[in-house]
Image (cartoon, helix red, strand yellow):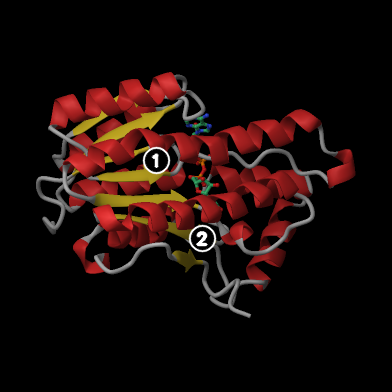
Amino acid sequence: MSQRFEGKVAIVTGAAGGIGRATVERLVRDGARVVATDLKDAPIDETAAAVEAIGGEVLTAAHDVRSWDDWQRVVAEGASRFGGIDYLVNNAGIEGAVAAIDESPEDVFDQVLAVNVKGVFLGMKAVIPQLRKRGGGAIVNLASVAGVIGEAAIAPYVASKHAVIGLTKSAATGYGPEQVRVNAVGPAPIETRMMRALETGLGAGEEATIKAALEERIPLGRYGTPDEVAAVIAFLCSDDARYVTGSFYTVDGGMTNY
Ligand SMILES: NC(=O)c1ccc[n+]([C@@H]2O[C@H](COP(=O)([O-])OP(=O)(O)OC[C@H]3O[C@@H](n4cnc5c(N)ncnc54)[C@H](O)[C@@H]3O)[C@@H](O)[C@H]2O)c1
């Protein structure tokens, strides 16, 4: 086990989901203590059990990233338990519904933007004062390949991930002088619940065909795994990325490489 994050504390949102859980496990394996948060009915206990199996320390919290009150509580609890915060991984996200714009319910747009964009904004707003107290830190925001390309069937999601990149660049510019680095990652389809939902939304009963068609668009020929995304998130938090800020790192098997 590497100890590159010894003495460091991270908050990871959406930590009961595929990429969130893998990220928590990766940061813990590398020596961090983690505040792992998710909606109150999400199976965050499974993430906590995985951390305990590794022999790491985790604080779990029920947390809706759309709520400023929740952010204030989570940050205060994390800082009080572990003595401060060094990293934030804004990972919580929803895909919304698969539908063309003219057939898309208005409330889907509001929900997707609230979680994927406002959630990231509030997270940075809540955590930056804590990073400042430590003399700097790192934030990694989950964008997507949908942050740089269009997809007709999930326009609100695409808009939200483009916005995450804008927030990332803005924060990197503003807080660089305080040694707060802010980067975004852009995964291609990753093997999690989210892709299963999107495959069904794109063609119920045709999931295997949909998946094969998506894989054809990826030069490496397959979906990624949550661990492969977690590895890049951990790199962006680490000192190896100390001169990296305002960047968008694809983790996409070459999907957007054209
Ligand atoms: N899976 C992919 O193919 C893929 C590709 C690119 C980007 N991403 C992004 O990666 C992130 C993680 O996705 P995943 O694939 O692990 O999905 P997932 O559905 O497995 O996990 C997402 C987690 O976010 C939580 N969440 C949803 N709304 C929330 C809210 N309001 N407050 C707090 N938590 C909330 C869910 O409960 C869930 O545990 C998302 O931001 C997603 O957009 C995923």
Amino acid type of the residue tagged 1 in the rendering: Met
Q: Which residue is mark 2?
A: 186
Secondary element type, mark 1: helix
Residue 15 locus on image (x, y percent):
39, 37
Is residue 8 left or right of 140 when viewed as pictured?
Answer: left
Secondary element type, mark 2: strand
Amino acid type of the residue tagged 2 in the rendering: Gly
Q: Judge by depth and name the residue closer to the eye, 85 or 171.
A: 171
Q: Residue at x 35, y 23 (%)?
A: 72
The quarter of the image holding the C terminus is: bottom right
In contact (CB < 8 Å): disc 2 and disc 1: no
Asked if disc 2 is less than 8 Å from ligand 1, the answer is yes
Q: Which mark, by number, is residue 58?
A: none
Residue 175 locus on image (x, y percent):
34, 52
Q: Nearer the viewer, mark 2 or mark 1?
A: 1
Residue 173 locus on image (x, y percent):
40, 58
Q: CA distance from mark 2 to mark 1?
A: 18 Å
Residue 51, placed above or below residue 195: above
Residue 131 seen: yes
Q: Quadrant of residue 149?
A: bottom right
Q: Judge by depth and name the residue closer to the eye, 10 or 41.
A: 10
Is residue 172 left or right of 214 when viewed as pictured?
Answer: left
Q: Which residue is mark 1?
A: 124
Is residue 1 left or right of 183 when viewed as pictured?
Answer: left
Q: Residue at x 42, y 51 (%)?
A: 171
The quarter of the image holding the N terminus is: bottom left
Residue 15 seen: no
Residue 252 locus on image (x, y percent):
52, 67
Residue 126, placed above or below residue 151: above
